[in-house]
Image (cartoon, rainbow, N blue to C red):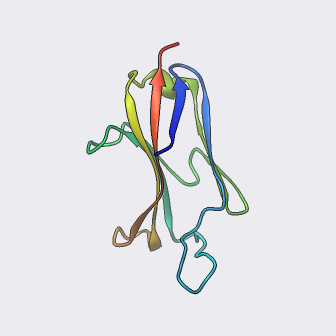
């Protein structure tokens, strides 16, 4: 699992390139406006401490997504190791939820 490190109280951003679901026999299933794309940070097996749902806190360029955390958001995060995930809920109904990215996030003191 890839680990990202952010400094408490400093703005941070994360890039997710070429986002889509690989489908057998097809190149990739693209994210549609009816799908719910969610970025979350939390301790493993606990409720997330921060959640952003596209388009709030995101930017999109083609099939790549960029998530931005403000200095105020990272200042509220205790210095711990977290699980950072990007998930998509196909058609936004909660029945088909897929994890697109799963990384460790370490919040370090300033």
Q: Residue furthest bottom?
A: 25
x then y, percent, for residue 49 = 37, 36
Q: In the drawing, does residue 11 fall left or right of residue 46?
A: right
Residue 34 higher or lower than 51, as above or below: below
Residue 45 higher or lower than 29, as above or below: above
Residue at x 38%, y 22% (from the top left corner): 78
Q: Residue furthest left?
A: 45
x then y, percent, for residue 68 = 60, 39
Q: Residue furthest top?
A: 110
Compare residues 48 and 24 and report the one nearer the observer. 24
Residue at x 58%, y 76% (from the top left corner): 29
Compare residues 28 and 34 and report the one nearer the observer. 28
x then y, percent, for residue 25 = 57, 87
Q: How many marks?
A: 0
Compare residues 6 and 10 and report the one nearer the observer. 6
Compare residues 6 and 76 and report the one nearer the observer. 6
Q: Residue furthest front?
A: 1
Residue at x 43%, y 23% (from the top left corner): 76
x then y, percent, for residue 51 = 43, 44
Residue 74 higher or lower than 101, as above or below: above
Residue at x 68%, y 63% (from the top left corner): 63
């Amino acid at each position: 699992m890839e680990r990202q490190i952010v400094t408490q109280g400093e703005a941070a951003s994360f890039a997710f390139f070429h986002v889509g679901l690989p489908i057998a026999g097809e190149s990739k299933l693209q994210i549609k406006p009816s799908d719910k794309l969610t970025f979350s940070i939390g301790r493993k097996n606990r409720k997330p401490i921060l959640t952003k749902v596209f388009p709030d806190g995101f930017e999109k360029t083609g099939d790549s997504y960029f998530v931005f955390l403000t200095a105020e958001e990272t200042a509220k995060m205790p210095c711990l190791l977290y699980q950072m995930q990007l998930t998509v809920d196909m058609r936004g109904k909660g029945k088909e939820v897929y994890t697109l990215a799963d990384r460790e996030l370490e919040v370090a003191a300033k």
